[in-house]
Amino acid sequence: MMGTEKIRIPFLARPAYTRGSRERQHSVRGGAAASATHETVLRREATASFISRGPRAAGVSPGTASKALNGRRGVRAATVERVQQAAERLGYQPNALARGLLAGRSFTVGLITTDSFGRFSIPVMQGAEDSHGPGRISVLLCESRDDRIREQHYLRTLLERRVDGIIVTGRRQDPREPIGRGLPVPVVYAMAVSTNPDDPSLVPDDEEGGALAVRHLLSTGRVNVGHVTGPSRFAAARLRAEGAEKVLAAAGLQLAGGTTLFGEWSEEWGHQATDVLLRSAPELDAVFCGNDQIARGVADAMRDAGRHVPEDVALVGFDNWEIFAAACRPPLTTVDMNLRELGQVAGDRLLAAIDGRPASGLQKLPVSLVLRESSRPRQAGLLRPQSWDADRARHMVIEEERER
């Protein structure tokens, strides 16, 4: 089987086709016969070393051993297993290129990402590898840096390498143009949304993530909930805010301070927004943040202002980025986008498309809440507004979760 590898294909600052393209194409056409001969050699090489000793060890004929190793039909499962066990005992390693030629596949997948830090693309890639099974696929990782020219270069490079399919991912879920149309291999978008409704696109359910965070805060007895998030131009920021506001409205409440505070995805913005919230809503007892970086800034600013988390103000973030969530003081309750699981679904979709069963359209995948110290339930005996029945709120949230 083929070992999993991650290859960064270097960006070449040159046009895809040079003046010698025509000659090169002619050379490729002229070499078709040589390629066919080469393929025949590889087919023979794929099993030659094992066929010399393996059939006797497995108790089968050379022809049956060859069929079992190459996955051909007409061989019983028990026989295939016996041949594979004999091959393993003899230390046989099949020729990966020959295996691909025999199967009509390269057993490689391209992953093109705009995520320079790998915060979102690496878990997606790991999940995609999980879906194919350990050691069965090679992943070619290409970072486009939000550069359309670079992205198209990588697309051409991956197609030249005859990948079986491509996963396109990024650091935000805003709609984007398809990477190409009429491509010879299937494409799946993960943590990205293609504007072509025929393309399969997979994203975390951001709106439900916002709702999940606020339901949790209400269930702990908090009633004055503020929301600090990133730029309103990002779909994720808007959807998370909508989910939070809907849950509050259903409970007869409004956001503390009267509105969502849109800003930047940064700790500095968390500091600034905390000052705004404490001035506009002195009764503030909880904050839902659009990401973990903002939440860490809010936690520090609360401490500077003499407010304690979670005793005075409960705090929930979004992303479950360990570098911020676990290092926050106190450790941060946060919404996990389950990116590895999302990548696994993307890999499953790609495999199905390769096998002739393509999917299409946008699918939102479940998120989950990771509980830590920052949102510990309110202690008994603390004052609450008379207009709010916290026990009724908890009951309402529990019943809603049951219905879901």
Image (cartoon, grey):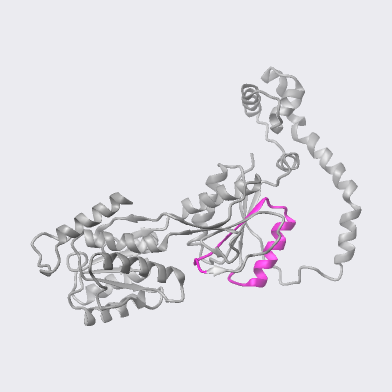
For residue 151, above or below residue 94: below
Residue 153, magenta (yes or no): yes
Quadrant of the rendered image containing residue 42 = top right
- For this orientation, the residue located farthest to the left is 381
**Could you tell whether 155 is left or right of 397 in the image?**
right
Quadrant of the rendered image containing residue 302 = bottom left
For residue 280, above or below residue 141: below
Q: Is residue 376 visible?
A: no
> Residue at left 37%, top 61%?
209
Q: Give how far across and how far down residue 75 sits, in percent.
A: 69, 24
**Could you tell whether 344 is left or right of 11 in the image?**
left
Q: Give how far across and how far down residue 224 sits, in percent.
A: 21, 71
Q: Name the image quarter holding the N terminus.
A: top right
Q: Give how far across and how far down residue 104 sits, in percent.
A: 74, 43
Q: Give how far across and how far down residue 397 sits, in percent.
A: 24, 56
Residue 332, magenta (yes or no): no
The residues colored magenta run 145-174
**Could you tell whether 364 is left or right of 188 in the image?**
left
> Residue at left 22%, top 72%?
303
For residue 269, above or below residue 117: below
> Residue at left 75%, top 19%?
61
Q: Is residue 119 visible?
A: yes
**Could you tell whether 178 is left or right of 72 in the image?**
left
The one nearer the camera, 219 or 31, is 219
Quadrant of the rendered image containing residue 252 = bottom left
> Residue at left 62%, top 72%?
147
For residue 251, above or below residue 62: below
